[in-house]
Amino acid sequence: MMIYFYEKRSETLYYYIEPRPSRSTVNIPFYCSRGYVVFVPDIVYKVGHSGESAYNCIVSGAKSMCQQFQFVDSTKMAIQGQSWGGYQTAYLVTRPNLFCAAGAGVRSAT
């Protein structure tokens, strides 16, 4: 399972995203069409505790997905965050030993 996050994404649930490779973000339909489960949690922030807020939402959501869906392998979960989510990815890999891969992305100003 890939966990892709950036603040709140639920408002884009029904947006069309063209399935194609991407340089630094997770293209959800591209990965789903290749057999991955992509979990996109909303992050509810507590002022002054952005890393801990991301931790609480992402880790509890990942554990819940593993409990609800037996096909999700808890030993092969990856996280990816872009920009602000990249900072949170760097924070999350210092906490639980839960993720086997992590990507912290940022777009260059070109």
Image (cartoon, helix red, strand yellow):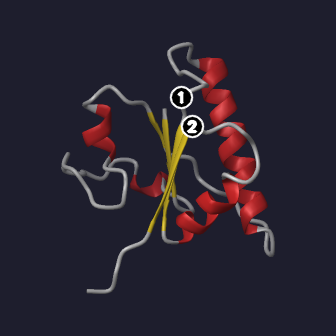
Identify the residue at image location x=60%, y=68%.
87
Percent x, y of residue 71:
50, 15
Pointer 1: what residue?
76
Percent x, y of residue 109:
32, 86
Q: Is residue 76 above or below residue 52?
A: above
State how far apart marks 2 and 1 are (Cα). Answer: 6 Å
Question: In the image, what residue type sits under mark 2?
Answer: Cys
Q: Is residue 42 above or below residue 36?
A: below
Question: In the image, what residue type sits under mark 1?
Answer: Lys
Identify the residue at image location x=57%, y=37%.
100
Percent x, y of residue 67:
66, 19
Label 2: few (<14), some or many (≥20) within 10 Å?
few
Classify residue 30 by image quadrant: top left
Pointer 2: what residue?
100
Identify the residue at image location x=61%, y=25%.
74
- The outermost residue toward the top is 70
Is residue 64 toward the left or the right of residue 24 in the image? right
- Position of the C terminus, as image quadrant, is bottom left
Percent x, y of residue 75:
60, 25
Label 1: few (<14), some or many (≥20) within 10 Å?
few
Classify residue 106 by image quadrant: bottom left
Dot 2 or dot 1, earlier in sequence? 1
Residue 96: mark in rendering: none
SS under mark 2: loop
Classify residue 46 by image quadrant: bottom right
Total marks shown come to 2
Which of the pair 7/92 is nearer the observer? Answer: 92
SS under mark 1: loop
Q: Is residue 33 above or below residue 10?
A: above
Is residue 73 toward the left or the right of residue 33 in the image? right
> Is the Cβ of the residue at disc 2 closer than 8 Å to that at disc 1?
yes
